[in-house]
């Protein structure tokens, strides 16, 4: 689909694939927040990012050298580092004497604005001159289907966690 739209492989990885593979985390976090299990959401995000950077990229590099382009080093990686730093600052407010460690509505909006800036930067610098926004948005309509499939993820994760706890208690 992305090739048909004329997107470069880097843009596909940074937008379509990244967004699509983040949908399970998004779903778990949404339902965790509504279910009162916010810590599950934070653990999910931090753990997923650590796994993607250290495990997935590490294994890929072991199998074959991973070519990192200069644009990635100077544009995309700084965005990722800044996002992680924002999370740190927002979560550590209480340690700096600025309230509690809850992530607020305003901070959520800041994250979404930052994400929009990232997508805009990536799509603007892509080689595609006539990017078809309507088609792109239509293709992202799969979100609804994925959300319905993983609706019960928080309950399942909690059950797995409690089952693991019971197994550990027996030994």
Image (cartoon, helix red, strand yellow):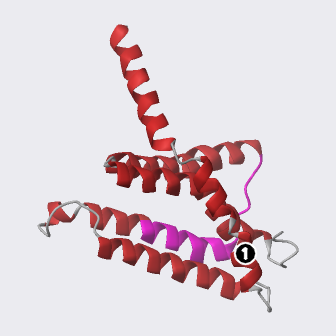
Residue at x-position 55% and y-position 78%: 118
**Front residue of this view, candidates 70 and 96:** 96
Q: Secondary structure at mark 1?
A: helix
Residue at x-position 55% and y-position 69%: 77
Residue at x-position 84% and y-position 69%: 1
Image x and y of residue 16, in percent:
69, 67
Image x and y of residue 115, in percent:
51, 75
**Front residue of this view, candidates 126 and 67:** 126
Instruction: Name the magenta segment's main secondary structure.
Output: helix
Q: Which residues are magenta?
A: 64-83
Above or below, 110 relative to 165: below
In the image, is 143 to the left or to the right of 11? left
Quadrant of residue 93 in the image? bottom left
Above or below, 165 relative to 77: above
Q: Is residue 80 magenta?
A: yes
Q: Residue furthest left?
A: 97
Residue receiving disc 1: 138
Q: Residue furthest bottom?
A: 129
């Amino acid at each position: 689909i992305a090739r048909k739209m004329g997107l470069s492989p880097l843009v596909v990885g940074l937008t379509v694939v990244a967004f699509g593979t983040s949908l399970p985390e998004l779903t778990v976090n949404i339902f965790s927040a509504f279910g009162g299990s916010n810590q599950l959401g934070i653990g999910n995000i931090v753990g997923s990012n650590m796994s993607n950077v250290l495990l997935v990229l590490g294994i890929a590099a072991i199998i074959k050298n991973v070519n990192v382009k200069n644009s990635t080093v100077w544009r995309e990686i700084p965005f990722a580092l800044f996002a992680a730093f924002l999370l740190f600052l927002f979560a550590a407010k209480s340690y700096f004497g600025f309230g509690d460690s809850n992530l607020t509505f305003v901070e959520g909006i800041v994250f979404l604005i930052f994400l929009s800036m990232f997508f805009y930067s990536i799509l603007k610098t892509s080689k595609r001159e006539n990017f078809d926004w309507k088609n792109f948005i239509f293709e992202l309509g799969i979100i609804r289907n994925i959300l319905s499939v993983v609706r019960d993820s928080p309950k399942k994760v909690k059950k797995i966690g409690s089952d693991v706890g019971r197994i550990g208690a027996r030994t």
